[in-house]
Image (cartoon, helix red, strand yellow):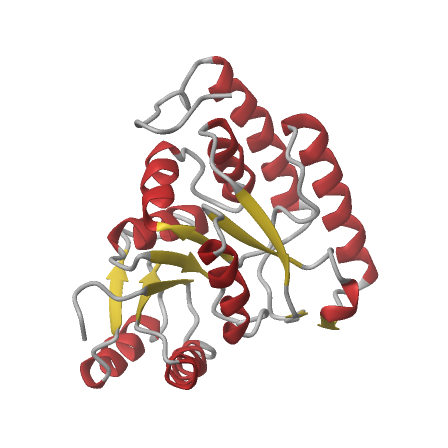
Amino acid sequence: MSSHPQYSIVIPAYNESARIGRAMEEVLSCARDRGWSVELLIVDDGSTDATARQVADFAAIHPEVRLVRNPGNRGKGYSVRHGLLQASGQVVMFTDADLSAPICEAQLLFDAIEAGADIAIGSRWLERSRQTDRQPLYRQFFGRCFNVVTRAIMGLPFADTQCGFKAFRREAAHLVFPLQTIERWGFDPEILFIALRCGLRIVEVPVTWGHDERTRISYLRDGIQMLQEIVLIRWNALLGRYNRTTPGTTTR
């Protein structure tokens, strides 16, 4: 495999031994079918089950796969940043181990970037008909409420900030993620907020989505934490912690 693949796909994984084998197989199968030049990075977030061993065994016979290990359990945001900043693809993306968005839907994100976007984000809400297995009503309610609050407080003009299916030009990822401060569930609004401040073009793309009942997020516990993190993002902005720019970008 080339040392510089076209695409890098990052999957954060914490105690995912029940799902990670199927996820790796599906990613590589789709890559073969689509003719993608791809590397797959599985970021183990301090798992206490067999996740890391499964990935290492799989990677031993599939050179496209690489195991990245966090220093203990640090959270999804840390895992995504750790993986994307180690990725070598021209376009880098992350998705969840449950593959709630079928991995071949990534082509929609890649096409948006090819058409000129710096960042392409999947959306469950732009075309609701694409939801194959919908979330329970209470999860839909809390998710939409969180998104409304996020948009109001942070000025993010997106229908779905939390979808775990996002792709970046390599240069955009290396501009945004070093400025990220939130390491757990609330990192998505932060990276979008940073990207907009850096003048990057973000395109929201409707994707097919099937809810997985095994999701670990708690809308009460984690929702409260994410609301606190939104306040922290605004505070960081006031302190100038997101002001770093590179040539060719502007700060809004």
Location of residue 242 in the rendering, given as x and y in whole percent from the top left corner: 42, 24
Q: Quadrant of the rendered structure where residue 6 is?
A: bottom left
As displayed, is residue 22 above or below residue 74? below
Q: Quadrant of the rendered structure where residue 230 is?
A: top right
Q: Is residue 63 left or right of residue 172?
A: left
Q: Which residue is most to the top?
A: 239
Could you tell me if residue 95 is visible in this image? no
Q: Is residue 202 left or right of residue 242?
A: right
| Front-lying residue, 113 or 174 | 113
Q: Quadrant of the N terminus?
A: bottom left
| Front-lying residue, 110 or 42 | 110
Location of residue 196 in the rendering, given as x and y in whole percent from the top left corner: 52, 32
Q: Is residue 180 left or right of residue 210?
A: left
At x 55%, y 32%, the residue is 229
Location of residue 95 in the rendering, given as x and y in whole percent from the top left corner: 48, 63
As displayed, is residue 173 above or below residue 122? above
| Front-lying residue, 125 or 21 | 125
At x 79%, y 69%, the residue is 129
Location of residue 171 in the rendering, given as x and y in whole percent from the top left corner: 32, 44
Could you tell me if residue 148 is visible in this image? yes
At x 53%, y 25%, the residue is 232
